[in-house]
Amino acid sequence: RKSLVALPDGFELQPNYPNPFNAQTLIPYQLPRRARVELTIFSVSGQRVRRLVGEVLEPGTYTASWDGRNESGQAVGTGVYLLRMRAGGFARTRRLALIK
């Protein structure tokens, strides 16, 4: 018997948890159809800190994680960061708080 897994109704970027976070935060998101996904962390001044996802993914539910490090692997400072998801014409931004 083939099990049917319900596909998400739409694109969604859910709240990260924990938030605020210290060592790591998990970022759930979902795709109703195959799409190129960009999941990027920015500073509040708009500078790109780190790209977490940048690829074409199949429909489904995913979880990305961020360890509070930039593209070079250096720990970033305490503060508020912006997480932006873009996929298939969908765009959503959420705030993440990193506490050291």
Image (cartoon, helix red, strand yellow):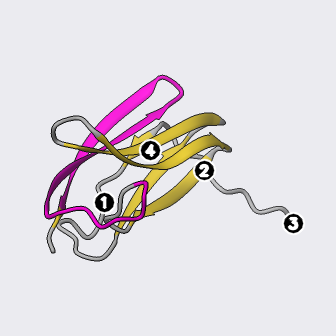
Seen at 21% across and 50% down, the residue is 81
Q: Give the spatial CA distance, label 2 vs label 4.
A: 15 Å
Task: Provide the residue designation for mark 4.
Answer: 39
Residue closest to the eye, 81 or 62: 81
Left or right: residue 24 versus residue 88 is: left
Alpha carbons under labels 3 and 1: distance apart: 35 Å
Q: For the residue marked with disc 4, what is the amino acid? A: Leu
Q: For the residue marked with disc 3, what is the amino acid?
A: Arg
Tell me the kind of residue under disc 2: Gly
The quadrant in which residue 16 appears is bottom left
Q: Which residue is drawn at 18% across and 63% down?
A: 77
Q: Which mark is residue 1?
A: 3
Between 8 and 79, the one lying in front of the other is 79
- The residue pinned by badge 2 equals 60
Point out the stretch of residues depicted in magenta: 71-97
Please tell me which residue lies in front, 4 or 52.
52
Residue 4, how many percent across, how many down? 72, 57
